[in-house]
Image (cartoon, rainbow, N blue to C red):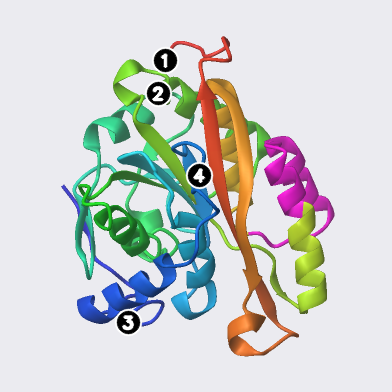
Amino acid sequence: MPVRQPVVAGRFYPGNPGALRRELEHFLAAPAEPGGPARPAWGCMLPHAGYVYSGGVAGATLAGLHLPERLVILCPNHTGRGQPLGVWPGGAWLTPLGAVPVDEALARALIAAGGGFGPDVQSHLGEHSIEVLLPFLQAARGERGDVVPAVVPVCVGTRHPEALARAGEALAAVLARPENADVGVVVSSDMNHYENVRRTEQKDALALERALAADPEGLLRMVEEADISMCGAAPLALALHAARRLGDVRVELAAHDTSATASGDTQHVVGYAGLRLYLERGQKADIPAA
């Protein structure tokens, strides 16, 4: 089965394992909310820029957070390669901290679910937005002495609302099966890109309002109407569709920042947000068989 090699180690984050661990420990030491999260989370949204810019938000989101051991990771497609909903089918992804196994059984189930997902490595080969998150997930679990998470990487290259709704329905049907009760979802996304800090904060607030309302349709409509360049709006919408099919979802904002904090440049800014997703399963009865 395919092994995905790192392509941005040494650029977006340290390629040396020791330096990477020290950097991750620094970011994950960010204070969590008082008392920590009220209960284990179903998932989260994390930013995927260079760690000097977005590492603080990623660390603050994951600090104290208990994610499931198996994760479907949904990312945007920055390269334009591959399928609209490309699933890495098996093997492992390598980082400087070691191998992250791909859950092949879960990947097969998702591909067979009828939501438009297909086996695809091309969309992932040059795509950084999952790779950048994996060391954070490895380190966050390692701090608690847990096993390395098993993942299913999915590159989302469509923004068509109907396609994303169908995909979310199919993902929910797979995750509703008893054998997948321990699966969660991670979304990779930055927020608005390359406007001044005032406009970026305004646009981020508009998108986050819809995200916090767990409103995938409204999120996609808002980013289109307000011209918000949130690269992971489609992956987040897909995740929210799935969550709403599975039960009652609650979304919390864990952190928000912009690149101006690190760079000092307030004219060409990228926004970063960390979200935590909590799910009460079994509250909905409209999950179709798959």
- Mark 3, mark 4: which one is toward the viewer? 4
Query: Amino acid type of disc 3?
Result: Gly
Q: Main secondary structure of the magenta part?
A: helix
Marking on residue 37: 4
Can residue 209 be found in the magenta stretch?
Answer: yes
Tally of numbered discs = 4
Tell me the CA gap for discs 2 and 1: 7 Å
- Assess whether mark 3 and mark 1 are in contact (beta carbons under 8 angstroms): no
Answer with mark 2 or mark 3, whichever residue precedes in sequence: 3
Secondary element at image label 4 = loop
Q: Give the side of residue 23 with respect to residue 162, left or right.
A: left
Q: Label 1, on which residue?
A: 290
Report the residue marked by disc 3.
Answer: 10
Q: CA distance from mark 4 to mark 2?
A: 26 Å
Instruction: Please name the amino acid that badge 1 sits on.
Output: Ala
Above or below, comparing residue 172 to residue 217 in the picture: above
Q: Write the residue at 29% across / 21% down.
A: 179
Under mark 2, the amino acid is Val
| Labelled disc at residue 174 | 2
Nearer-N-terminus badge (4/2): 4
Mark found first going from the N terminus, 1 or 3? 3
In this view, 257 is above or below 274: below
Give the CA distance from mark 2 to mark 3. Answer: 36 Å
Residues at discs 2 and 1 in contact (Cβ within 8 Å) = yes
- Location of the C terminus (image quadrant): top left
